[in-house]
Image (cartoon, helix red, strand yellow):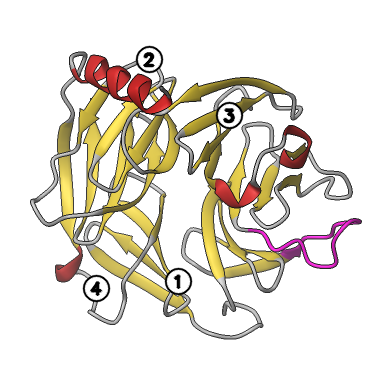
Amino acid sequence: MKRLLAFLGLMAACLAQDPLFLIKDFNLSQIIDDDFTPQRIAALGDDRFVLLDQNSNELVLISAGEILRRTGGFGQGGESFTEPVDLTVHNLQIWVCDRYENALKRFDYKLNFLGVDHIFSNEYDSFLPDLITADPFGKVLVFSQQYGQLLSLDNSNQSLIDLNQYGMDGGCTIDLKTDNAGNIALLSCENEITLFNRFGRKSKMSLVHIKDPIQILTWSNNWVVINSMGEIESTNGKVNVLPLREDETVLDGDVYFEHIIILTDQRILVIKK
């Protein structure tokens, strides 16, 4: 029954499409070497991006289709990483979540290293963070899939959200983001979005209709979910398709004002409604 409802919802959503416009794109093969294969992106502008390669543990700063700086690598000190898993932009800084080091490393917009914030938890010796986001009120939030808990960096002694209280599997959480009101959205591998208010109280659950979603974002005052095939579903019931090439796969995305920035295995796309 659940799959049938999802199918019917997707069919209805596909009838309510709005066009998406490709403003510009950047071919990765013309910018970076073959030894750098990014999986994560953070947008600093509509032509300025930070890319994270989780295989080489490196960050690359790109502006107007050119590399400005490349930093990182394997290690436990300063600019290097042990297990970088996610990144976000907050307070004019780039925050990189290092799971093994149980820490967040901060860089400025030129990729100069600024410092490191370690995550302390009364309950666990090592919190093992997998996902990072920040709310509009200045809080940096980190989530551990292993423990199913969301912590705020300014008060990590107590979990803001504990999925175990709801019988939910933290290992099934794919992504999380916050909106302009501080509400928190968790995307699960069961094609569900669970919403919490900024204080961690569960408020709503909804079903995702597109197949195999990989990311949730807030764009144009709506939650949108993206899958690797380039389908974008909004919680207002609309589904759009990104202008991908036939053999192109979506890896990650970010939002910069009215633009949605998409990282694929071949390009960076700047999209507008």
Q: Picture coordinates of residue 78 (x, y %)?
A: 64, 79
Q: CA distance from mark 4 to mark 1?
A: 15 Å
Instruction: From the image, tell me which residue sits under label 1.
Output: 54
> In the image, what residue type sits under mark 2?
Asn
Q: Is residue 124 magenta?
A: yes
Q: Of the residues shown, which amino acid type is indicated by label 1?
A: Gln
Residue 199 shows in the view:
yes
Q: Secondary structure at mark 1?
A: loop
Name the residue carrying label 3.
194
Question: Label 2 crowding class (10 Å Cα cut-off): few <14, some 14-19, many 20+?
Answer: few
- Give, as a single range, the part of the protein colored magenta: 117-129
Q: Residue at x 74, y 30 (%)?
A: 200
Query: What residue sits 20% from the left and 65% below the top?
Result: 28
Q: What is the three-letter code of the residue carrying label 4?
A: Ile
User: Principal SS element in the magenta part?
Assistant: loop
Whether residues under marks 1 and 3 lie with C-beta atoms below 8 angstroms apart, the answer is no
The kind of secondary structure element at disc 4 is: loop
Q: Earlier in the sequence, mark 3 or mark 2?
A: 3
Q: Which residue is mark 2?
A: 236
**Along the line of sight, the residue nearer the viewer: 32 or 151:** 151
At 29% from the left edge and 47% from the top edge, which residue is drawn? 262
CA gap, disc 3 and disc 2 = 15 Å
Q: Please state if 162 lies on the left or on the right of 84 as rendered.
A: right
Q: Quadrant of residue 234?
A: top left
Q: Badges 3 and 2: C-beta atoms under 8 Å apart?
A: no
Nearer to us in this view, 188 or 269: 188
Could you tell me which secondary element the residue under label 2 belongs to? loop
Q: N-terminal of the two: label 1 or label 2?
A: 1
Residue indicated by mark 4: 32
| Mark nearer the N terminus (4 vs 3) | 4
Q: Residue at x 49, y 82 (%)?
A: 73
Which numbered disc, 4 or 1, marks the residue that appears first in the sequence? Answer: 4
